[in-house]
Every structure is written in C-alpha cells, then in structure tokens.
Image: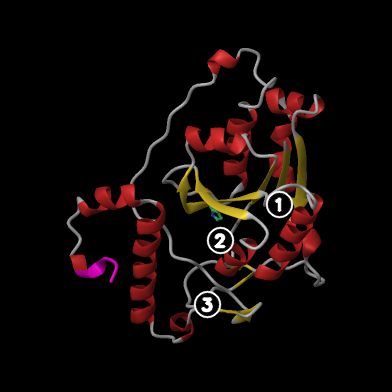
C-alpha cells in the first residue's frame, strides 16, 4: 500500500517511522510519502491561510495550495486502477470505525489531507472529488488542533491490518463512540475559485441570516453524514423549525 500525507507540519508524522509501522515501511509493506503543503505555495511568505468569509474567529486554509499538492499526489499514481481515497480528517466527518479501517486496508493507495486553523476551504473538498474518492473522517466527537494526530491514528489502525505487519493476526479486534452536531462548511478568498462561488449569504454581512444559514448547514451535514447523532441531539427536544427545511 502507498500512503501520501499532506500537512503544514510534516515533522508531526515522524512517529510513523517507529515501531510496527516503521518496520512495515522497512519491509516494503507500506510505502509512505509525507508532503509539506507550503512547498506548493507561490508567494514569498508561503501563505496557506486567510480570513473566513462571513466573519468568525480564526483563519481558513486557502484552496489553491491544496489543489497543487493534491494534483501532485494524484499524479504519483497515474495509470493505476480507480481513484485513490482522500481522507480529510475533520470533526465534521463520518466516524472512523474499525469497519472503515478494514475497508481502507483493502485500498492500493490512501491520501490524507491534514487541515489546520478553522479548516480547509470547502471548495477544495468539492474539487478533489474529480481526482479522488473523498472521505471527510472524524476520529470521534472531540476537536484536535489539526488533522495530523488523526492521521497518525488512522495510519496505525489501517497499517496494522495489512498482512505481515502484526506478529499474531489473531490480535486484530477494536471498537468506537459519539454525540452532538457537525460543523458548517468554511470559505475564504477568493470569492470565486475555479468557477465555484462562496455561498452569497456569507458575503451579505447579515450576521443573523449567516448564523441561521450555518445552523442549517450543521443539520444538513449531520443528517447526511451522521444521522445517528440527530437521535441523540433530539433528546434535547429542539423545535422542528430549527431542523432541515
Ligand atoms: O479533531 B480533528 O480530527 C481535526 C481535524 C482537522 C482540523 C483542522 C483544524 N482543526 C481540526 C481538527
């Protein structure tokens, strides 16, 4: 299996040189490549983030460096069958489970996009679908500062399932858990990127409507990706009007 990881902190992935995963790499079972996102920027300051449209705290990762990095990753496997899987660690993703680890262990090529700040411009996730089978994935319903720790966990969970990695295959058994709503999508400049526009409401300056839109997006995403979470959320008896239209 080939694995590519894109991060602004490539040194965060150093632990993958250790222990069973490190040995799997030495044995040629795992072919791991880590890429620094900043090497795909073109400005003097190697800028990877900007302010969020619609306001709010923090910064959002710019789309263009990501498109350059992910294009390079996709081209590394040109000529191979099917689209590689792109895992985007995110608190707003499908839940990572042992079943998913087993599914991913059957793939020829996995790519991981490590977000930071408030996340990656949502249009990158949409665009990447042209080159990858894109899977936003959450380790569980808590928030880290970026995707790297999640990648370390997932690479270990998947790598250990590959034949020849753990000494005794009998020892491969595990579980997982969850509650709450998923995050809304985030956007930053430019307002139009590769013919994809930022939702107009986020440019309106109407903070009430923006908050309403973001709440709706949370329910839309949770309904699409984590319906199991809605049952837990409804236990709080939220008025139906706040639900999806
Ligand atoms: O909790 B997480 O899995 C996670 C993943 C990516 C980002 C980017 C900014 N915060 C993040 C948290």
- Asked whether, in this view, residue 140 is left or right of residue 82, the answer is left
What residue lies at 72% left-to-right and 36% top-to-bottom? 1
Mark 2 C-beta to ligand 1 under 8 Å: yes
Secondary structure at badge 2 equals loop
Which range is magenta? 241-245
Callout 3 crowding tier (Cα within 10 Å): few <14, some 14–19, many ≥20: many
Q: Are marks 2 and 3 in contact (CB under 8 Å)?
A: no
Q: Nearer the viewer, residue 139 or 11?
A: 139
Q: Earlier in the sequence, mark 1 or mark 3?
A: 1
In space, the residues marked 2 and 3 are separated at their CA atoms by 13 Å
Residue 124 against residue 82 in the figure, above or below: below
Q: Percent from the top left, x then y, of residue 206?
A: 39, 85
* Residue hosting label 2: 119
Q: Percent from the top left, x then y, of residue 89?
A: 56, 50
What residue lies at 53% left-to-right and 78% top-to-bottom? 198
Is label 1 or label 3 in front? 1
Q: Quadrant of the C terminus?
A: bottom left
* Residue hosting label 1: 6
Question: Which label is found at residue 53?
Answer: 3
What residue lies at 61% left-to-right and 78% top-to-bottom? 189
């Amino acid at each position: 299996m080939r694995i590519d990881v894109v991060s602004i902190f490539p040194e965060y992935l150093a632990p993958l040189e250790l222990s069973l995963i490190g040995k799997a790499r030495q044995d040629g079972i795992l072919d791991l490549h880590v890429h620094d996102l900043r090497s795909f920027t073109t400005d003097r300051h190697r800028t990877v983030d900007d302010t969020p449209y619609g306001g709010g705290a923090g910064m959002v990762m710019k789309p263009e460096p990501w498109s350059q990095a992910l294009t390079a990753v996709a081209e590394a496997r040109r000529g191979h069958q099917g689209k590689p899987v792109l895992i985007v660690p995110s608190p707003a993703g499908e839940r990572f489970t042992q079943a998913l680890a087993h599914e991913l262990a059957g793939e020829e090529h996995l790519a991981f996009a490590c977000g930071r700040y408030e996340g990656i411009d949502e249009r990158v996730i949409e665009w990447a679908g042209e080159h990858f089978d894109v899977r936003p994935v959450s380790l569980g319903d808590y928030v880290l500062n970026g995707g790297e720790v999640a990648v370390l966990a997932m690479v270990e969970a998947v790598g250990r399932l590959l034949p020849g990695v753990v000494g005794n295959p009998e020892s491969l058994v595990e579980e997982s858990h969850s509650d709450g709503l998923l995050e809304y999508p985030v956007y930053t400049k430019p307002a139009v990127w590769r013919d994809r526009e930022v939702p107009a409401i986020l440019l309106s300056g109407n903070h009430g409507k923006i908050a309403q839109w973001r709440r709706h997006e949370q329910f839309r995403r949770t309904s699409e990706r984590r319906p199991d979470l809605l049952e837990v959320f409804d236990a709080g008896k939220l008025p139906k009007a706040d639900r999806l239209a």
